[in-house]
Image (spheres, grey):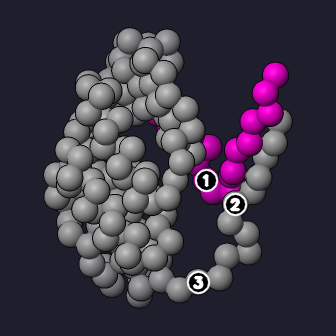
């Protein structure tokens, strides 16, 4: 068996989106993940995944024949420029504007985010929380 590596340390272990048009979603998320510097984890005919996000067709075994409803996912960005790059990449690859990059002071000081709708209408956000010190980039799990 091949060694696998996961990075954890937040509330969500993983989430699955079941989409109508996998090719459109793959183009959208590949561009978004490139902008966020997140590598694609794997891909097959009926799914792809990166980090904790698994995206599949309704025909995949894991989907059990049902599309997921509308979700809001927020991806962490390393800085404001990355939020801006996420927004441009998303719009250029099938996303729809749902809130241009900017500071959202109502959330907390320094909260800089952009919002787009993916090809299935999910509200996808990239957020930079401002200057902060992390104790570690993530928890690394190898098995």
Give neighbour class at mark 2: few <14, some 14-19, many 20+ (Cα, 10 Å). few
Q: Position of residue 59 (x, y in %)?
A: 38, 12
Give me the C-alpha separation between circle 2 and circle 1.
Answer: 12 Å
Q: Quadrant of the C terminus?
A: top right
For the point 38% across and 76% down, the residue is 81
Give neighbour class at mark 3: few <14, some 14-19, many 20+ (Cα, 10 Å). few
Dot 3 and dot 2 residues touching (CB under 8 Å): no
Q: Tell me: 53 left or right of 103.
A: right
Q: Which residues are magenta?
A: 1-16
Local secondary structure at mark 1: loop
Front label number (1 vs 3): 3
- Is residue 46 rendered magenta in the image? no
Q: Quadrant of the N terminus?
A: top right
Local secondary structure at mark 3: loop
Q: Which mark is residue 94?
A: none
The answer to whether any part of residue 26 appears in the image is: yes
Residue to which mark 3 is pinned:
132
Give me the C-alpha separation between circle 3 and circle 2.
Answer: 15 Å
Residue to which mark 1 is pinned:
11
Instruction: Compare marks 3 and 2 and give the one earlier in the sequence.
Output: 3
Q: Is residue 91 above or below residue 52?
A: below
The answer to whether any part of residue 69 appears in the image is: no
Residue to which mark 2 is pinned:
138
Q: Tell me: 40 left or right of 27.
A: right
Dot 1 and dot 3 residues touching (CB under 8 Å): no
Instruction: Return the residue nearer the eye: 65 or 45.
Output: 45
């Amino acid at each position: 068996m091949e060694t696998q590596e996961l990075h954890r340390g937040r509330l969500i272990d993983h989430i699955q989106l079941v989409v109508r048009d996998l090719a459109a979603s793959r183009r959208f998320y590949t561009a978004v993940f490139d902008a966020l510097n997140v590598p694609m984890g794997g891909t097959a005919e009926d799914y792809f995944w990166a980090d904790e996000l698994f995206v599949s067709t309704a025909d995949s075994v894991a989907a059990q024949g049902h599309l997921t409803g509308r979700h809001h996912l927020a991806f962490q960005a390393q800085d404001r420029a990355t939020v801006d790059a996420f927004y441009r990449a998303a719009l250029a690859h099938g996303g729809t504007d749902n809130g241009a990059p900017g500071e959202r002071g109502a959330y907390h000081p320094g909260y800089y985010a952009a919002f787009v709708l993916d090809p299935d209408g999910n509200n996808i956000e990239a957020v930079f929380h401002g200057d902060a010190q992390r104790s570690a980039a993530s928890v690394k799990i190898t098995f």
